Image (spheres, rainbow, N blue to C red):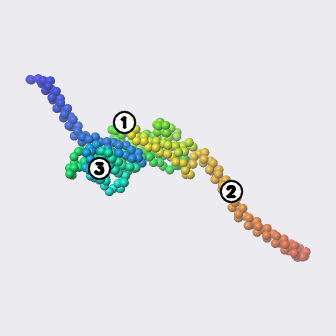
Amino acid sequence: MKRKTEKEKMSECHLCLLGLIALSSLLTGTSGVNDAHVFISSGENVRLPCNNALHDCTSTTWNYNRFRNSGTVELIAGGKKKNTERQERLSLGSKCSLNVNNISKEDYGFYSCRQLVNDKQQEPDAHVHLHVLHVSQTEISAGLSVTLFCQLYSYPRVSCEDLIRSERIELFWVNQAGVKLMTDSRYQISSSSDHCLITLNITLLNEDHNREWRCNVTQRDQVKASITYTVKSSDMITFPAEAEVRRTAGLLFRVMVIIVEFAVFAAPTVILLQIICARRAGRKDSQHPEETEINTILE
């Protein structure tokens, strides 16, 4: 039996390697252009890159999908904005990137940049996953506590749990110094991997007036987006030290109101009684002694 030479073995090895690469491309659906993941906080402006741009943007089309089975919305066609509800917030930037101003949580989703020349696609689509970080709060409870919700809105191509694992994404709360908040008697922190959601329940103290709480999202240990939230102090927010003062002041005010009301309504009655007594006394003085004695007996 003829033995294979080293050259033949190397050639077979190369063929096997090329076959594995081709099989991997088929299984993963690689298009030749890497998908970009962009993280942004609500209220900010964002730039979505177009990694397949040609020499100008007259061939550029930007499409958008929010949900897996939702219809595609055409935002830009032939380098010009389409008539959509977000038209005023959209513009083309350098290298045909898509600029979106004043991001809201509804802007998250799957964006694709396509190049069409004479209705023929020139390059594979450039895909951008836009993840929006958003914070909201509950009303402050009677027990002087509040819950903050920090959620990462993402295109549901995969579950949030898979996204966190594959992209090594982490959500967490930090204080004003940037230190992670840990669970203790004042902070209760819970998370839900299914919805990329982390909640922070705070028992409020006097020093929490207008204090900032910040939620961070990291990808592979690098901060990608951060959003700050301030619990506003208002007439509806009453902290413990102020509560006692306000209760005392309210009680004194109610007592004063009762005294004033009593004085207002009682004064006419006192005056009327004085008038009646004076008239009766006058009538008695004008009568004869005998009449006075008879009236006294009758009375």
The residue sitting at the left extreme is 1
Quadrant including the C terminus: bottom right
The x and y percentages for residue 28 are 25, 40
Q: Which residue is mark 2?
A: 256
Q: Residues within 10 Å of mark 3 (few under 14, many from 20)?
A: many
Q: Nearer the viewer, mark 3 or mark 1?
A: 3
Q: Give me the C-alpha separation between circle 2 and circle 1.
A: 65 Å
Quadrant including the N terminus: top left
Determine the residue positioned at 26% across, 50% down: 58
Q: Residues within 10 Å of mark 2 (few under 14, many from 20)?
A: few
The residue sitting at the front extreme is 55
Q: Residues within 10 Å of mark 1 (few under 14, many from 20)?
A: few
Secondary structure beneath label 2: helix
Secondary structure beneath label 3: strand
Q: Give me the C-alpha separation between circle 3 and circle 1.
A: 28 Å
Q: Which residue is mark 3?
A: 62
- Judged left or right of residue 278, residue 231 is left
Q: Where on the picture, by quarter, is residue 38?
A: top left
Q: Give me the C-alpha separation between circle 2 and circle 3.
A: 69 Å
The x and y percentages for residue 282 are 84, 72
Above or below residue 1? Residue 183 is below
The residue sitting at the right extreme is 289
Please, what is the three-letter code of the amino acid marked with disc 3? Answer: Trp
Q: Give the mark, 2 or 3, whose residue is nearer the N terminus.
A: 3
Q: Which residue is mark 1?
A: 220
Please, what is the three-letter code of the amino acid marked with disc 1? Answer: Arg
Q: Nearer the viewer, mark 2 or mark 3?
A: 3
Q: In terms of depth relative to the viewer, which is nearer, 124 or 234?
A: 124
Determine the residue positioned at 15% across, 26% down: 9
